Image (cartoon, helix red, strand yellow):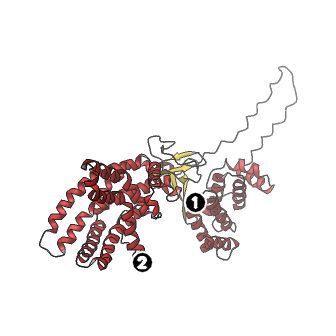
Amino acid sequence: MPAPSENSHCQYHPRAAAGWFCPACDAKLCPDCAVVESVASTDLLSCARCGGAVEEWKVHRSHAPFSRRLLGAWKYPLKKSGLMALLAVGAVVALSRGVSGMLPLLPGLVPICIWLGSFWGSIFWIVRGTSMGAEHFTAPDFHDVHHDLVRPAIRGTVATALLWLPAILFALLVEDLDLPDALFWVVVVLATVLYAPMALIIAATGESTLSLLNPFKVIGIGKRLGSAYLTVAAWMVPLAMVHGALMLVAAQVYSLSIPLVASVLAEGISLYVPFVMARMLGLLLYVHGDRVGYGIESEFYEPALPGVKPRGKKRAARVPAQAQPEAHQPAPRPRFIELEPEPAPRPAAAPEPLEAQVVKAVETNALDQALELYRRLPENLASLPAASHVAVGQKAAAAGDYPLAIRALKQVAQLTPEDPLAPKACVILARLYGERLGDAASAQKLYRHVVGRYPGTDAARFAQSRLTAA
C-alpha cells in the first residue's frame, strides 16, 4: 500500500471519499466499491471491481481541521465525567488548602503538597489521556504518594516557574531596580503564551525535571510542532481572560455562607479553564506528537471513513468469449468439368473448456500457463477441483500475485469446505493476510476457524501454533 495521503477520493467515483485501497487495481475505493465477503466464517474485505483483497485507507490525524478539535475542548469539562472531575478535584483542593491554613509552616507543607499534587496530577492526567485518544475524563490511577502527588506538584511548579518567579522578583526588586509595571506584565504574558504550554506538555509526558528549565529544549520542541503550537499558544490569551472572569465568579461563590459546599464549588469553577487548557495541550500531542517523537508514527493515522461499512456488491467476472471456428467454405468447382464428388469436410474439433485446460496445466506442472488460464475463468467455479485452486493459489503467492492467490484460495474455502485440501487453503490464506497484507486480525480469525473446523489436522496444529505465538 502506498503512503497514506490526504487526497482520498474514489478511483471510480471521483466525488466520493475513499475508505479502502485495492493493491490489485492500484485504486482507492469508496463504500460502493468495497465488498464484505464471508470466507471460512470470517468477514474479509475485497474489491467489487477485481475481487482482490483491499486494505483500509488511512489519513493523518492532521487531516481534520485542528482548530475544530480545539473548539471542542471547551465542552470537555462540561461533560458528565468532566463535571464530576471538577467537583472531585475541587473538593480535594478546597480541603487541603483549608487544612494548610490552620497548621504551622512545616506540618502545613503536607496539605499544600496534596493541594498542588492533586491539581497538577489531574492536569497531567488529562494531557496524557487526551494524547492517547480518550474522549472523557477517567479517574487517575492513584497508587503511590510520591509518584501521584509529590512528583506532579514539583513538575507543575517548575514548569510554571516563568510565571511565578518573575512575580516574586518583581515584588522584591521593583523598588531597587525601578522597573515599570508594563515590563513585568509583558514578561508574564510572553511566558504564559509562548513558553508555559510547551513546558507543561514536557512536564506531563515524563521528561526529566531539569529539562523543564532548559529553554533551548522547550523552545526547540515548540518549533518542531510548528503552526499547531502557535495556534494553541494563541488560545492562551482568551483562556486567560475567561479564567479571570471565572475567578471573580468563584470569589463570589466562595463568599456564600455555605460551609464547605461554597469552597468546593468555587474551586471547581476555578478549575474549568485549566481543564480546557490541558485538553488543548493533549490534543496537540494527539494530532502532532509524531513530530516530536511522541508515540509510534503509525498510530497517528486514522481510517479515512471511520465507522463507515462497505456496501458494494461483487460484480460477476467477465469471461472472454472463446474463438469460434469459421464455417467451412467449399472451394469453387471449375465449370463444365465433371469430377468425382469431394468427401464431406470433417467438423472442426470444439476447443477444450478453460477449466479442463487449467486442470491439465496443473497436472503437467505447467503452473505459469495455469495462472494465465485461471485469470480467464469466472469466480465461484465449483466444477474446478480443489487441487487446481490450491496449486494456482500457491504459485500466485510465490510469484507475488497476492490478489490472484487470494481469489483462488477463497474458492476452496467457500465452495468446497469439506475437501481435504480446504484446511490447507485456509492456512495459506491466513498467512497471506497476516504476512503479506499486514491484516493480522483477519489472519487470526482464519487460524481460529481452522482450529475449530478441522481439529486434528496438520493445518489445525500449524494454526494453533500461530495463535499461541500471537
- Local SS, label 1: loop
- Mark 1, residue position: 439
* Disc 2 residue crowd, few under 14, some 14–19, many 20+, Cα 10 Å: few
Label 1 vs 2, first from the N-terminus: 2
* Disc 1 residue crowd, few under 14, some 14–19, many 20+, Cα 10 Å: some
Is 66 left or right of 371, judged from the image as shown? left
Can residue 139 be seen here? The reply is: yes
Is 130 left or right of 361, judged from the image as shown? left
**Front position in the image: 120 or 167:** 167
Mark 1 and mark 2 residues within 8 Å of each other at the beta carbon: no
- Amino acid type indicated by mark 2: Asp
- Amino acid type indicated by mark 1: Asp
Q: Horizontal and vertical percent for residue 437? A: 61, 56
Residue 433 occupies quadrant: bottom right
Q: Which mark, residue 144?
A: 2
**Front position in the image: 324 or 213:** 213
- Mark 1 or mark 2, which is nearer to you? 2
**Front position in the image: 286 or 22:** 286
Q: Horizontal and vertical percent for residue 194? A: 37, 50
- Local SS, label 2: loop
Measure the C-alpha gap from mark 1 to mark 2. Answer: 40 Å
Residue 453 vertical position relative to residue 217 in the rendered view, above or below: below
**Front position in the image: 84 or 56:** 84
Q: Horizontal and vertical percent for residue 36? A: 51, 57
Is 338 left or right of 328, judged from the image as shown? right
